[in-house]
Amino acid sequence: MAICRYAGEGPKASYHGNIDKPPVTCTPNPKRDASVPTLAQMTEKAIDLLSRNEKGFFLQVEGASIDKQDHAANPCGQIGETVDLDEAVQKALEFARKDGNTLVIVTADHAHASQIIPADSKAPGLTQALNTHDGAVDGDELRQL
């Protein structure tokens, strides 16, 4: 069972973004310690074991908890699970670069309407104002990158 990177009891999105409340900052999940392997660690181990086969191998890695966190209206969890998947993909790409004969495909079975919008927006649906790692509150700073 995967344990979310950010606290599962974190802020929940609500209709029209908890406008009356200050933005929240995602915090690490205390239940996810070094004894719990990350998706990237599991991917790296699987590649290590499977790559010993001279006939090659097929490996499917799934970041299924992104979807679960979105359905739970947990934006911090959704972001954390996306970061976890990205780190796992990076492990696959590292192997592919070294191997030179490996195809890495990243896809999704469906999408969600999660997005970064300016703090002063009144978006339809579930929203939650979050502080980014650099302290920004809305998407304006991200668009400038």
Image: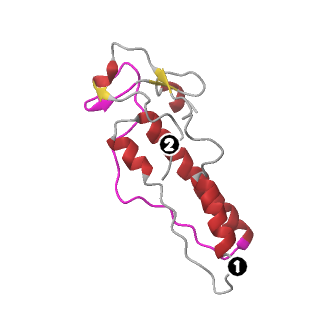
Q: Is disc 2 surrounded by few (<14), some (14 to 19) or many (20+) residues within 10 Å?
A: many
Residue pointed to by mark 2: 4
Along the line of sight, which residue is nearer the eye, 1 or 4? 1
- Residue type of the residue flagged with mark 1: Arg
Q: Where is residue 123 in the image (x, y as percent from the top left)?
A: 29, 28
| Residue 80 x, y percent position in the rendering | 51, 41
Instruction: Work out whether residue 21 or residue 107 is closer to the camera in this orientation and state it.
Output: 21
Indicate the position of residue 141 as horizontal and vertical percent values: 53, 26
Please name the residue shown 37% across and 39% down the image: 114
Where in the figure is residue 25, as x and y percent of width and height? 51, 24
In the rendered view, would you say 88 is above or below 47?
A: above
Residue furthest right in the image = 98
The quadrant where residue 40 appears: bottom right
Magenta residues (range) = 99-128
Quarter of the image for the C terminus: give it: top right
Local packing at callout 1 (Cα closer than 10 Å; few below 14, some 14-19, many 20+) is few
Based on the picture, tell me whether residue 67 belongs to the magenta stretch.
no
Name the one closer to the observer, 70 or 93: 70
Residues at badges 1 and 2 in contact (C-beta under 8 Å)?
Answer: no
Q: Is residue 43 left or right of residue 122?
A: right
Q: Distance between the residues labelled 1 and 2?
A: 31 Å
Q: What element carries label 2?
A: loop
Name the residue tied to disc 1.
Answer: 52
Q: Describe residue 4's horizontal placement relative to residue 115 as left or right.
A: right
Residue type at mark 2 is Cys
Q: Residue at x 52, y 63 (%)?
A: 61
